[in-house]
Image (cartoon, rainbow, N blue to C red):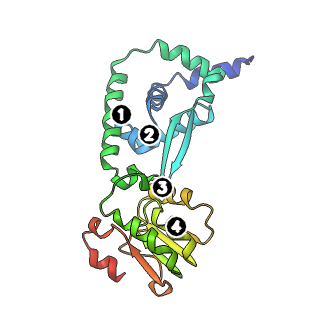
Amino acid sequence: MSLTLEQSTALCRLLADGTRVRLLLLLEGQELTVAELVQITRLAQSRVSTHLSRLQRAGLVSQRREGAAAYYGATAAGRGSVVGGLWDLLREQLTDAQLRVDRERAAEVVRARQRAQTWAESVAGRMERHYSPGRTWEATARALIGLLELGDVLDVACGDGVLAELLVGHARSIAGVDISPTLIGAARERLKSAAHVTLLEADMHALPLEAARFDHVFVMHALAYSRRPLDVLVS
């Protein structure tokens, strides 16, 4: 690919910024949110966001949404471009103490994110393959489910939709509610072919639904995670 003088100058300017170089190196290691990048680099959020936009326009960075969070990562496609080739040459020559500090902070941020993740979120989309307390309910439910017609069902703290999947052929409608965007995303993927299932991201202590419209309400393994279980039962 041939470049005009103006284009070549713009490419050089893109990578002639220390902040953009730091962000690119971090995002080649792992996907990170803007808040995490701010925590690692100690830079203002507006500055980080501005540089991410420049890198996105150049095709070096992409964005992936997970619930309410937006994760940024380095793109493989950008590596084959002219700017990607220029970045490859530059990266090979980089040695700086700040970059080592950035890597150490990034590793701690990712560890903190993983520690904050709940057990349910860590197995989202494959919950039925893992042990969880009280799993004997599933064997009992499978034995009895064929005898039931459940009408309209509310599944409180529905997780990744494993219970709703079990009930889907025996209910007129199912509404699943969970506070975790990760789990709701996994539930939507699991139940994407079930048109009569509605999944909402909401707090079980303040359900945005009318309880009177449901024939059956399930609250499976949820109250143990609440400091106000009575609020869940009366909501």
Q: Which residue is mark 3?
A: 68
Residue 171 location in percent, x, y? 55, 77
Categorize mark 3 by other alpha carbons within 10 Å: few (<14), some (14-19), many (20+). Answer: few
Q: At x 45% / y 70%, what residue is drawn? A: 143
Q: Which residue is mark 4?
A: 199
> Which of disc 2 and disc 3 is earlier in sequence?
2
Q: Amino acid at mark 3?
A: Ala
Q: Amino acid at mark 2?
A: Leu
Q: Nearer the viewer, residue 79 or 172?
A: 172
> Which of disc 3 and disc 4 is earlier in sequence?
3
> Which of disc 4 and disc 2 is earlier in sequence?
2
- Disc number placed over residue 138 in the picture, else none: none
Q: Residue furthest bottom?
A: 212
Distance from label 2 to label 4 (Cα)? 27 Å
Q: Which residue is mark 2?
A: 32
Q: Amino acid at mark 4?
A: Leu
Disc 3 on helix, strand or loop? loop
Q: At x 52% / y 75%, what residue is drawn? A: 146
Distance from label 4 to label 1 (Cα)? 33 Å
Categorize mark 2 by other alpha carbons within 10 Å: few (<14), some (14-19), many (20+). Answer: many
Q: Residue furthest top?
A: 93
Which is more foreground, mark 4 or mark 3? 4
